[in-house]
Amino acid sequence: MTETFDIAIVGAGITGCAIARQLARFDLSICVVETANDIALGASKANGGLVHAGYDPAPGTVKAQVNARGCELYGTWAQELGFLFCRTGSMVLGFSDEDRAHLEKLRQNGLANGVPELLIVGPDRIHELEPRASAQASCALWCPSTGYVDPFEVAIAALENAVANGVTFMRSSPVEAIEVADSDDGAVRFTLATPAGNVRCRYLINAAGNGAADISHMAGAEEFQMVWRQGNIVVLDKEPRTLMPLYPVPTPISKGVIVTGTVHGNTVITATAAVREPGDTQTYASDVNALLTGARKLVPDLDTRRVVRAFAGGRPVIQGTNDFFIGQSAVVPGLFQAAGIQSPGVASAPAIAEHMELVMREAGVELHERADWNPIRRAPDDFDRAPLARKEELIKSDPAWGQIVCRCETLPEAEIVAAIRRQPGAVSVEGVKRRCRAGMGRCQSGFCQSRVVAILARELGCDPSEVLLEDAGSWLVEGPLKGVR
């Protein structure tokens, strides 16, 4: 089977999904081609979700161009796409005169990058803004525009909106080869070979995360190498009051160990930075200990015994540069690169999408807005957060809203069904988890996983033994379930 599109986007991480959503407003046929069986399974998944304000990138870099703008756009994107976004502000804590000098450098960077309202504050203001911040902190860079999101919720929301506006999503479709034809007349130029069939397109956007170098190589474009800069992250149980993001003074390669609240009330400690073998998602005791030690320096009363999950992922870093690579290929016209999107990739995603639109216009791609473009995505009902009156209304409409499956997150069966039926919907246990948090609570699926498997089997029309935890081969059930044949 071969399908033809105007644009193919390789990669359904937050970058590829944001670009798809941005370009869906135009009268073009678009396809998002993803190796995995769902959205945001690479760097977007193993991510702390911080929307960094933009004071960290060196002025003049591509990061600096898109970071502050992306942070600014999050308010609009959250309203239009219905995902949770908390603009809490943040502080970079300093403990010495040397730290204060570094904070002033960050402030000057931020002013050059267009970050608003940056101030260096003293101990009294620090503890007024965040009472749990270390009493040893003598100064801090206060940044009101910082916030946080659930990174895979953003990616899912963006792609759902793109699909509602006509974009095609091809999951479980790793690109195995790319054929490039000579064409100066706007005809089809690229043919992508995948196990699900060939994809032909006039323009190709490489947003493949840690696989971006492979896609560029297949297309005969720029040769570069990806470095797997691995990060371990620790999630703590929910707090009565969520913490403001607190940063240490950064290093040349990392923002350091950060403590932050989340949109769901947990505390996250993020992230270490160590160069390891590509694909290494193991958690390391030394890294976890470094996270806990670094967190206690920022928040001494943090109860680090309340860890519910530790996980790891790899930032897509281009060897030899600490910057993003966004633009048309200088080697293969019609190929557009969005590569090396490491931190602050989540914060920058809306602006990367906006920048990609500008790059394509400058390259001569005709972008005519569709009359039926709809930027609004209605968020699914979140039973746990809904007012009592809405809960009663939902249960009255369908008793499955009253059948609680995940006790930790107060998640009913109907919400899981909705996550599977949405387009594109969940097709695995982890896909359900990303969309409605089944299994993200204190017990980490101890009570609800078997119920989720049964609901997926029913909704997907398959046997429970065929239900996947995540990608192909990750079956959870072997043979008959107890009492079921």
Image: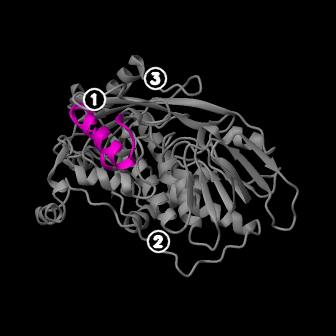
Q: Is residue 444 magenta?
A: yes
Tag 3: residue type?
A: Gln
Number of the label disc, if any, that sits on residue 342:
none
Q: Which mark is residue 481?
A: 1
Disc number placed over residue 282 in the picture, else none: 3
**Residue sitting at 22 percent across and 32 percent down?**
443
Mark 2 against mark 1, which lies toward the viewer? 1
What's the colour scheme? one colour
- Dividing the picture into quadrants, the one containing residue 190 is bottom right
Label annotation for residue 375:
2
Residue 409 place in picture, x, y as percent: 21, 44
Secondary structure of residue under mark 2: loop
Give the residue displayed 43% in from the left and 33% down from the top.
271
Instruction: Name the spot of residue 166 as percent of width and height, x first.
Output: 55, 67
Query: 393 left or right of 362?
Result: left
Q: Position of residue 378 (x, y in %)?
A: 36, 67
Of 383 and 466, the residue lying toward us? 466
Q: Earlier in the sequence, mark 3 or mark 2?
A: 3
User: Horizontal placement of 382 versus 352: left or right?
Assistant: left
Question: What's the magenta region?
Answer: 436-464
Residue 437 picture quarter: top left
Front label number (1 vs 3)? 1
Magenta-drawn stretch contains 125: no
Residue at 67%, 73% (x, y): give it.
367
Q: Nearer the viewer, residue 14 or 409?
A: 409
Residue 59 in sight: no
Find the distance from the CA under tag 1 to the CA under tag 3: 31 Å
